[in-house]
């Protein structure tokens, strides 16, 4: 029954994913278990659902590998290692997260629902995508008021947090006031190398 439940759930999920739209000049298109984000007609980010066979559950993940901030950050070579194990400027996976934005389970996964529960589960997933994950990914492609707050909230999800903020503010200088900028400069999870990182932020 598990495979049948998965097939039914993924079919229902795709219907909900197809209703999700973009903003800020970023378009969103749905395919099986995935959302693709296009900026200037180029795919620059993904959100995907990964099935965990042993748990018969799904986790959510995402990568941003294009857009205004990414293109700016590629011009620099920070003197320390990226927080990420890939070439994106931002990535996440819900596995092991306790914020319960995607799943009420402390493991960050959603178990494959039975057919009678699938429509409601899919609607809940769409709600979490539209209210949090899709806007967050878009804010990592094109700078907005949410962009800086996202870095402060979870710096380890960004390859180079200080560089990311620098590039966002270089494109949109008015995103933060002096008080928040000073708060950022004192955050040890954002400032990994004082000479490099503070040099970038002080030069804004």
Image (cartoon, rainbow, N blue to C red):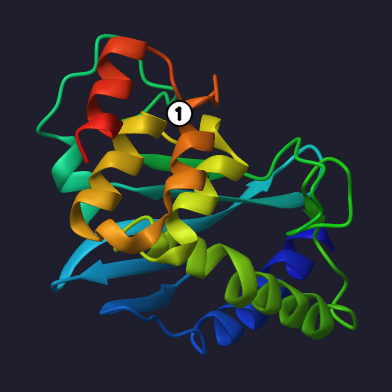
Farthest residue in the left direction? 75
Relative to residue 153, is residue 74 depicted above or below? above
Residue 44 image offset from top left, x and y in percent: 25, 58
Tell me the quarter of the picture where residue 152 sits: top right
Horizontal relation, residue 170 to residue 152: left or right: left
Residue lying at 80% horizontally and 61% vertically, measured from the top left? 112
Quarter holding residue 103: bottom right
Identify the residue position indicated by label 1 in the image: 185
Query: Mark 1 Cα within 10 Å, few/some/many (few <14, many 20+)?
Result: some
Could you tell me which quadrant the C terminus lies in?
Answer: top left
Left or right side of 101 for 188: left
Q: Position of residue 97 (x, y in %)?
A: 75, 40
Q: Is residue 8 above or below residue 172?
A: below
Q: Residue at x 90, y 83 (%)?
A: 116
What's the residue at 27%, 31% (across, down)?
Answer: 202
Q: How many marks?
A: 1
On screen, 86 above or below 113?
above
Which of these two is toward me, 147 or 20? Answer: 147
Q: How far across and down, in percent of the image, does residue 194 sit?
A: 36, 12
**Left of 144 or right of it: where is 153?**
right
> Residue 199, can we see it?
yes
| Image-based side of 122 in relation to 187, left or right | right
Would residue 143 be seen by someone viewing this image from the given angle? Answer: no
Of residues 181 and 15, the one drawn nearer to the viewer in this rendering:
181
- Where, quadrant-wise, is the N terminus in this rendering? bottom right
Question: What residue sits 43% from the left and 76% below the top?
Answer: 30
Q: In the structure shown, which secondary structural element does the residue marked by tag 1 occupy? A: helix
């Amino acid at each position: 029954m598990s495979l049948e439940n998965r097939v039914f759930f993924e079919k229902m999920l795709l219907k909900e994913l197809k209703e999700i739209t973009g903003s800020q000049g970023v378009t969103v298109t749905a395919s099986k278990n995935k959302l693709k984000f296009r900026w200037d007609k180029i795919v620059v980010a993904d959100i995907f659902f990964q099935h965990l066979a042993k748990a018969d559950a799904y986790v959510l993940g995402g990568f941003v590998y294009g857009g205004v901030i990414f293109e700016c950050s590629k011009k620099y070579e920070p003197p320390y290692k990226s927080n990420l194990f890939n070439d994106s400027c931002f990535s996440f996976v819900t596995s092991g997260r306790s914020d319960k934005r995607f799943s009420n389970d402390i493991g960050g996964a959603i178990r494959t629902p039975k057919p009678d529960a699938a429509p409601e589960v899919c609607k809940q997933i769409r709600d979490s995508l539209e209210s949090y994950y899709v806007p967050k990914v878009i804010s990592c492609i094109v700078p907005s008021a949410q962009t800086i707050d996202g870095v402060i909230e979870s710096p380890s999800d960004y390859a180079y947090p200080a560089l990311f903020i620098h590039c966002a503010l270089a494109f949109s200088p008015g995103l933060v006031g002096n008080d928040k900028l000073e708060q950022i400069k004192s955050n040890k999870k954002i400032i990994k190398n004082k000479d490099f990182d503070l040099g970038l932020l002080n030069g804004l």
